[in-house]
Every structure is written in C-alpha cells, then in structure tokens.
Image: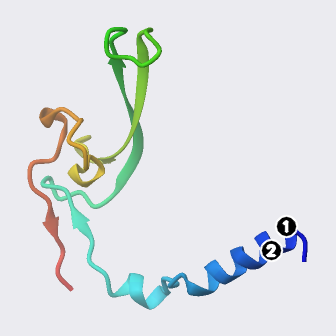
C-alpha cells in the first residue's frame, strides 16, 4: 500500500469515527436569541491593526477577525470572541436561549 492509499484509508477511518449531526438533532436544539430578540446572525469581519512594534514582521499589519453579528441590531455574538479581543461596545450584552 503506497502513501496515497494509506492517506485515503486514514481519512475514511477518521470519517467513520466522527459523529454525524442529524436533522432530528438540529430540530431538537435550541436557538440563541440576541438581546434584541433577533435570531438570524450574519458573518462579518472585524479588522484590527497591529502596530509595527508588536508585529512579528516589524511592519504594521491588519488582523481580520471573523465574527457573527445580529441581522437586526448589528451587535456581535459574544461566543464568537473566545479570546475577548472584540471591543465590548460591539457585543450583545445578554443572549436569550429559546426553550423547546
């Protein structure tokens, strides 16, 4: 068995062990609501500038940070900021979890 065949077999084995999310699981899950009541989130990118003094390259850099924001009010879902790098004034203060 050559390296390519081994890689394909390893990929198939990995796929067999990954749990699959079913339609029933999605149907029985809860929706996160923004504090404004919105339930639809859009993807966006927040750009931050890194100064040349802090940059590993020694040059000023732009850092794209992917975020999810509420379609209705524009506030960012706080769970998209695990490292707490997004300014607080851009985040939804409280999220409501819809009960089943």
Q: Quadrant of residue 31?
A: bottom left
User: Residue 63, percent across and down?
Assistant: 41, 26
User: Residue 44, percent across and down?
Assistant: 41, 39
- 25 versus 37 height, above or below: below
At 43% from the left and 16% from the top, the residue drawn is 61
At 86% from the left and 67% from the top, the residue drawn is 4
Density class for disc 2 (Cα within 10 Å; few <14, some 14-19, many ≥20) is: few
Q: Do residues under tags 2 and 1 come within 8 Å of each other at their CB atoms?
A: yes
* Mark drawn on residue 17: none
Q: Please name whichever residue, 13 or 28, is drawn nearer the observer in this view of the structure.
A: 13
Label 2: which residue?
6
At 38% from the left and 17% from the top, the residue drawn is 55
User: Residue 8, percent across and down?
Assistant: 79, 73
At 48% from the left and 86% from the top, the residue drawn is 23
Q: Please name whichever residue, 29 or 87, is drawn nearer the observer in this view of the structure.
A: 87
- 14 versus 39 height, above or below: below
Q: Is residue 44 left or right of residue 17?
A: left
Label 1: which residue?
3
Density class for disc 1 (Cα within 10 Å; few <14, some 14-19, many ≥20) is: few
Q: Please name whichever residue, 58 or 94, is drawn nearer the observer in this view of the structure.
A: 58
- 60 versus 17 height, above or below: above
Q: The N terminus lies in which quarter of the figure?
A: bottom right
Q: Is residue 60 left or right of residue 3?
A: left
Q: Secondary structure at mark 2?
A: helix
- 48 versus 76 height, above or below: above
Q: Secondary structure at mark 1?
A: helix
């Amino acid at each position: 068995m050559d390296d390519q065949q081994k890689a394909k077999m390893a990929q198939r084995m990995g796929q067999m062990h990954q749990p699959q999310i079913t339609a029933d699981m999605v149907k029985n899950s809860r929706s996160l609501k923004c504090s404004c009541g919105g339930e639809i989130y859009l993807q966006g990118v927040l750009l931050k500038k890194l100064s040349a003094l802090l940059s590993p390259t020694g040059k000023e850099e732009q850092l794209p940070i992917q975020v999810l924001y509420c379609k209705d009010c524009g506030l960012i879902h706080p769970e998209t900021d695990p490292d707490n790098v997004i300014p607080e004034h851009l985040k939804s203060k409280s999220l409501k979890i819809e009960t089943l």
